[in-house]
Amino acid sequence: MPRPRTERGAAVVDVVLVMVVLVPVVLGILQVALVLFVRNALASAASEGARLAATRDRGPADGAALTRAQIGGAVSSRFAQDVTAAQQGRTVEVTVHARVPALGIGGPAVELTVTGHAVEEPP
């Protein structure tokens, strides 16, 4: 049985109305997933760098270098531009500052700062 002429094109309008809501939601979920992935990778690299720097024969510079290398291998070396390592007493701290652009393509960015700590091995 053919449809009445008054409903022609109604499916196209329905799809457009749903897509107007659905596309921004999906893009927002992807952005959150990207930021969380990068944050976790940076935190892991900072922790590993601090652990290396806390070993007996290594220093903060070695920890910062390992952190940069791990960030470059896990996500991108552009996130490893601002890595600092310092030793305060027996504690080594590696800090990473990074900007994660919207969906990885530019535009407004999310600022991330993560820190890894480790206690220096006793002599």
Image (cartoon, rainbow, N blue to C red):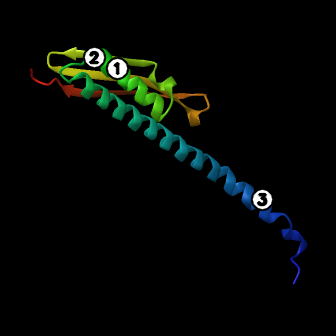
Q: Residues within 10 Å of mark 2 (few under 14, many from 20)?
A: many
Q: Nearer the viewer, mark 3 or mark 2?
A: 2
Q: Residue at x 16, y 23 (%)?
A: 120
Q: Which mark is residue 60?
A: 2
Q: Residue at x 60, y 28 (%)?
A: 107
Spatial CA span between label 1 and label 2: 6 Å
Q: Residue at x 71, y 55 (%)?
A: 17
Q: Amino acid at mark 1?
A: Ala
Q: Amino acid at mark 2?
A: Pro
Left or right placement of residue 55 versus residue 36 in this view = left
Q: Residue 71 location in percent, x, y?
A: 43, 29
Q: Residue 28 location in percent, x, y?
A: 55, 44
Spatial CA span between label 1 and label 3: 55 Å
Q: Are dots 1 and 2 in contact, CB under 8 Å?
A: yes
Q: Residues within 10 Å of mark 3 (few under 14, many from 20)?
A: few
Left or right placement of residue 35 versus residue 54 in this view = right
Mark positioned earlier in the residue sequence (3 or 2)? 3
**Please, what secondary structure does the residue beneath circle 2 have?**
helix
Q: Residues within 10 Å of mark 1 (few under 14, many from 20)?
A: many
Residue at label 1?
64
Q: Residue at x 20, y 24 (%)?
A: 55
Q: Which mark is residue 13?
A: 3
